[in-house]
Amino acid sequence: MPAEEAKKRTVGKPVRGESGPAAPLRRPQKMSEYTARQVVADIVESGLGAGDRLPAVASMAEHYGVGYASVREALRMLESIGLIKVRPGPNGGPVVNDRDGAEFSSVIRLYCQIMGVTYRHIIGARQALEPILVRELATGGSPEARQELLDVTARDPAPGADFRAQARSFHDLIACYSVANPVLSLFARAVGQIYREFIRAEGPSTEPADRPEIHAEHRAIAEAVAAGDGPLAEQLMIRHMADLAEYVETHYAMALDSVIEWV
């Protein structure tokens, strides 16, 4: 769509539907916003993934029929919400970012701060989301995905970093392999990222005394998923997340009611 079409998107009259009151007026679209939308559309239509390079600023300005300033502002907008990153240097430029939920969590943090959302709400969100996702994985996930979850829990992890890495992989796989509702998957990954940042910021607590039991819970959930037993996997995850909430309440109670800040 040429840039001239974007310039025409000023509203002169209220828009009415087939019935009912006039729709609210929309503000004119800025050229940088038009450009950002076109960049996103091209990323999707071209099937670009994490690490793929985008055209240079000059090429995009010519392609979209806009000025260099509009392109640069569009790229800053997309970088600020985590969709791309701009690498510095002579061989740098705009690159498609990862879509693992980590960058999306920054956007959620902004709204959380404005709305007064606390880390206790984040724990509650995990308790609500993960049982749904694990049920979906058990009933609709591919055999390969279910087997991967089983493989992650196959060995007994060593205390410390190894245990934490395995636990993270376990929960990340459940979120990533949601097949029925990618929206839930996206939010679960973002919420999980905020949770991990909270734990890291508050400092490591002592290693859970029930670490073997936590691993056993992971293994039981993975076995239920591998067997395709959605209801069992869901119930096991509900109990597991309740145990997690109790652990966090015990070790991080003073910080749980802090309002999440945008970083």
Image (cartoon, rainbow, N blue to C red):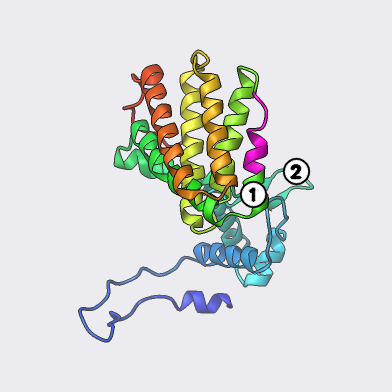
Using the image, tell me which numbered label, if any, was put on residue 209.
Answer: none
Q: Position of residue 226 (x, y in %)?
A: 60, 46
- CB atoms at circles 2 and 1 under 8 Å apart? no
* In the rendered image, the vertical position of residue 56 relative to residue 4, given as above or below: above
Circle 2 residues within 10 Å: few <14, some 14–19, many ≥20 = few
Instruction: Single out the mark in the foreground, 2 or 1.
Output: 1
Which residue is more in the foreground, 148 or 252?
Answer: 148
* Residue that carries the numbered disc 2 in the rendered image: 89
Between discs 2 and 1, the one toward the N terminus = 2
Residue found at the very far right of the displayed protein: 91
* Residue that carries the numbered disc 1 in the rendered image: 145
In the image: residue 144, left or right of residue 101: right
Q: Amino acid at mark 1?
A: Ala
Q: Amino acid at mark 2?
A: Gly
Which residue is more in the foreground, 192 or 113?
Answer: 192
Q: Secondary structure at mark 1?
A: helix
Residue shown at 55% from the left, 55% from the top:
73
Which residue is more in the foreground, 167 or 68?
Answer: 167
* In the rendered image, the vertical position of residue 234 relative to residue 22, given as above or below: above
Q: Quadrant of residue 219?
A: top right
* In the rendered image, the vertical position of residue 161 relative to residue 50, given as above or below: above
Q: Position of residue 176 (x, y in %)?
A: 57, 48
Residue shown at 58% from the left, 78% from the top:
1
Residue shown at 67% from the left, 28% from the top:
155
Q: Which residues are magenta?
A: 148-156
Circle 1 residues within 10 Å: few <14, some 14–19, many ≥20 = many
